[in-house]
Image (cartoon, grey):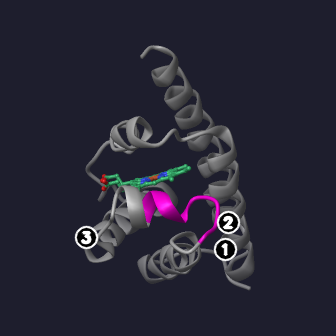
């Protein structure tokens, strides 16, 4: 298996992840029922986000934390949801890629998810 070195591979990885996540029993509803995301608009943002992290090209402009707070107000984003997100992400990465950048994809997601989970729980306790 190859490592992740190109935009095309980043897009492939994100596409495979979204194929799974939108029909996932545990967290699919956040995407389909709560946010009702338009994949044609959402996926390019995710490609840019991961290209910035994995390939070091600063193409993502946005705030990944911010968009999750309104979701959290409609339906709590709990630790178990983040665990499921991470499980699907890690499996998708490891099903297709191997190498240092693939490992970065897993560890960066874990770090971001931990911070995000903490912030979401904290936001709920302040209400
Ligand atoms: C339970 C876990 C998660 C759920 C259910 C979730 C759900 C969502 C949804 C529904 C959106 C679209 C929001 C909108 O456009 O209205 C979104 C955006 C996004 N998510 Fe998550 N997410 C989760 C965890 C994560 C994690 C761990 C990361 C990063 C590693 C992440 C990165 C992003 C990014 C970069 C965006 C796009 C932000 C932008 O519009 O610029 N998400 N997420």
Give the camera-side residue of 57 and 51: 51
Is residue 10 magenta-colored?
no
Distance, label 3 to label 1, CA atoms, is 21 Å
Q: Quick check: 69 above or below 125?
A: below
Q: Residues within 10 Å of mark 2 (few under 14, many from 20)?
A: some
Q: Quick check: 109 above or below 112?
A: below
Q: Residue at x 72, y 60 (%)?
A: 87
Secondary element under disc 2, as helix, strand or loop, is helix
The answer to the question of whether label 3 and label 1 lie on touching residues, with beta carbons closer than 8 A, is no
Is residue 25 magenta-colored?
yes
Q: Earlier in the sequence, mark 3 or mark 1?
A: 3
Q: Residues within 10 Å of mark 3 (few under 14, many from 20)?
A: few
The residue indicated by pointer 2 is: 88
In this rendering, the count of numbered labels is: 3
Distance, label 1 to label 2, CA atoms, is 6 Å
The residue indicated by pointer 3 is: 41
Query: For disc 2, does the CB lie below 8 Å from ligand 1?
Result: no
Q: Nearer the viewer, mark 1 or mark 2?
A: 2
Give the camera-side residue of 12 and 54: 12
Secondary element under disc 3, as helix, strand or loop, is helix
Q: Quick check: 36 above or below 18?
A: above
**The magenta stretch spans which residues?**
24-31
The answer to the question of whether label 3 and label 2 lie on touching residues, with beta carbons closer than 8 A, is no
């Amino acid at each position: 298996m190859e490592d992740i070195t190109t935009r095309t591979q980043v897009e492939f990885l994100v596409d495979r992840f979204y194929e799974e996540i939108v029909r996932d029993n545990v967290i699919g509803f956040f995407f389909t029922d709560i946010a009702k995301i338009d994949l044609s608009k959402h996926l390019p943002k995710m490609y840019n986000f991961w290209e910035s992290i994995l390939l070091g090209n600063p193409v993502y402009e946005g705030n990944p934390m911010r968009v999750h707070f309104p979701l959290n107000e409609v339906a709590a984003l709990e630790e178990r949801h983040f665990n499921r997100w991470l499980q699907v992400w890690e499996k998708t990465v490891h099903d297709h890629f191997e190498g240092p950048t693939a490992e970065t994809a897993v560890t960066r997601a874990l770090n971001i998810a931990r911070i995000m989970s903490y912030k979401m729980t904290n936001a709920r306790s302040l209400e």
